[in-house]
Every structure is written in structure tokens, then in C-alpha cells.
């Protein structure tokens, strides 16, 4: 989600404990089809490490995070993670930084680049997304709405500008998670390409 301070503030705001917050995050990740392996790892972990799913679901429902209409499965019954209805206002609150982070990314991203004497505009998203809002949402989801990950992406972009990294257009940058490539290159101590216009 975010840093520890923000997580604790979120728990305080909604009256949930950290174990309930973790289950909420797992439910959202599963429902958004974001990282199935992480969801499986969570449910394969020891019960004493994650807590009783039934008790955690009850806590989330009591706090109004899960809608009251949801029937919590009893012990031995199948748990359908995709059928858990989450309070929509809470989901918006959980993801509220998505637009702001996307906008920061847009403003930090290079305007254009010159390759073999030809200028190419880089802040384009239209081939991948219908709107900037869609692009921002996809970016937030890709970094799991974590400010520390966002800050690192911005750092990498600045390093790339300083070292002449060959940026793709913004839409491809988001879809391809190109910051991971930049991170790998940065670890090698080299980021070099043609001229980038700031």
C-alpha cells in the first residue's frame, strides 16, 4: 500500500488492525488480478503468521470495510476471494494517490527525444490508454500505489535525463514497466543513449 506511517493511519481511520489491512490488500490484489502468486503465497503461509481468515473477514465487516450483505464462510466452507464486496469509498481512499502520482510522473517525464536528428514526442499515451486518467491508474496499479516505489521511479527518470537514457513514449513506459529496466541499468552504473529534451 504505502509506507508504515500511512498504513497505521489507514488502520486508525477505518478501525482495523494491521492483519486485517494485509488481508484487505490481498483481496484487492486478487480482485484486480494483479499478482496471483502473491495471493497464493499469502494463503499458503502459516495460520499463526497471518491469522484466521474468518476472524479477519469478520473484523473487516464489523469496521464497514466489507459490506454487511456479505456472508462470511464458516470453517470448512470454500472462500471465494472474488466474491468479497469491498466498500467502494474505501477503495477510492486506498487508491487516492494514484492520480497524483500519475500526474507527477507525467510532469517529470521528458517531453521529447532526438534520435538520428529526428525529434519524437515522449509524453504520449494514446496508443495504450484512452485517457491520462487511465494511464495514471495503470501506473498506480503497476507500482501498487507505493509512494516509495513512485519516488524511486522519479529518481530513475532524473538519472536517465542526466545520462541520456533512451526513453520510450510514456504509454509504453507504463505498460512495459520500463523503470525496472532503468533500475537494472542503473545498478550497472551506465545509462546512455541519444539526446533527450527536458
Image: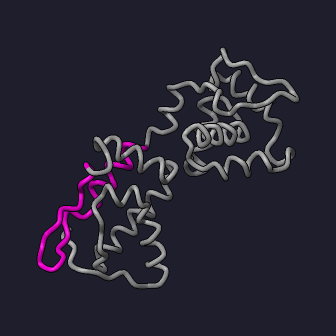
* Residue occupying the point 42% across, 72% down: 182
Q: Is residue 86 above or below residue 109?
A: above
Total marks shown come to 0
Find residue 163 and report its image quarter: bottom left
Find residue 120 and report its image quarter: bottom left
Q: Residue 101 at what x, y percent from top left?
A: 39, 49
Q: Residue 97 at what x, y percent from top left?
A: 43, 43
Give, as a single range, the part of the protein colored magenta: 98-126
* Residue occupying the point 53% across, 29% down: 90
* Residue occupying the point 42% across, 65% down: 179
State the quadrant of the C terminus.
bottom left
Q: Residue 184 at what x, y percent from top left?
A: 48, 75
State yes or no: residue 167 in magenta: no
* Residue occupying the point 68% across, 42% down: 22
Find residue 130 and report its image quarter: top left
Instruction: Report whether 173 appears left or right of 124.
Output: right
State yes or no: residue 103 in magenta: yes
Instruction: Report whether 137 appears left or right of 10.
Output: left
Check the image and name the residue furthest to the bottom: 189
Instruction: Report whether 22 appears left or right of 150.
Output: right
Q: Residue 140 at what x, y percent from top left?
A: 44, 48
Image color mode: one colour
Q: Is residue 163 above or below residue 87?
A: below
The one of 153 and 26 positioned closer to us in this rendering: 26
Instruction: Report whether 172 appears left or right of 83.
Output: left
Q: Is residue 186 above or below residue 151?
A: below
Amino acid at each position: 500500500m504505502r509506507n508504515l506511517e500511512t498504513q497505521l493511519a489507514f488502520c486508525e481511520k477505518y478501525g482495523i488492525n494491521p492483519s486485517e489491512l494485509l488481508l484487505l490488500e490481498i483481496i484487492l490484489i486478487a480482485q484486480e488480478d494483479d499478482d496471483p502468486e502473491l495471493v497464493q503465497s499469502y494463503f499458503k503461509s502459516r495460520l499463526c503468521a497471518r491469522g484466521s481468515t474468518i476472524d479477519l473477514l469478520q473484523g473487516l465487516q464489523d469496521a464497514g470495510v466489507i459490506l454487511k450483505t456479505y456472508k462470511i464462510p464458516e470453517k470448512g466452507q470454500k472462500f471465494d476471494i472474488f466474491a468479497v464486496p469491498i466498500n467502494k469509498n474505501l477503495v477510492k481512499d486506498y487508491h487516492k494517490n494514484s492520480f497524483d502520482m500519475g500526474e507527477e510522473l507525467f510532469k517529470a517525464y521528458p517531453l521529447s527525444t532526438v534520435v538520428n536528428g529526428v525529434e519524437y514526442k515522449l509524453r504520449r499515451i494514446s496508443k495504450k490508454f484512452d485517457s491520462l486518467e487511465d494511464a495514471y491508474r495503470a501506473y498506480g496499479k503497476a507500482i501498487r500505489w507505493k509512494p516509495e516505489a513512485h519516488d524511486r521511479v522519479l529518481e530513475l527518470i532524473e538519472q536517465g535525463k542526466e545520462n541520456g537514457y533512451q526513453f520510450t513514449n510514456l504509454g509504453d513506459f507504463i505498460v512495459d514497466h520500463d523503470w525496472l529496466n532503468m533500475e537494472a541499468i542503473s545498478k550497472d552504473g551506465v545509462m546512455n543513449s541519444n539526446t533527450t529534451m527536458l
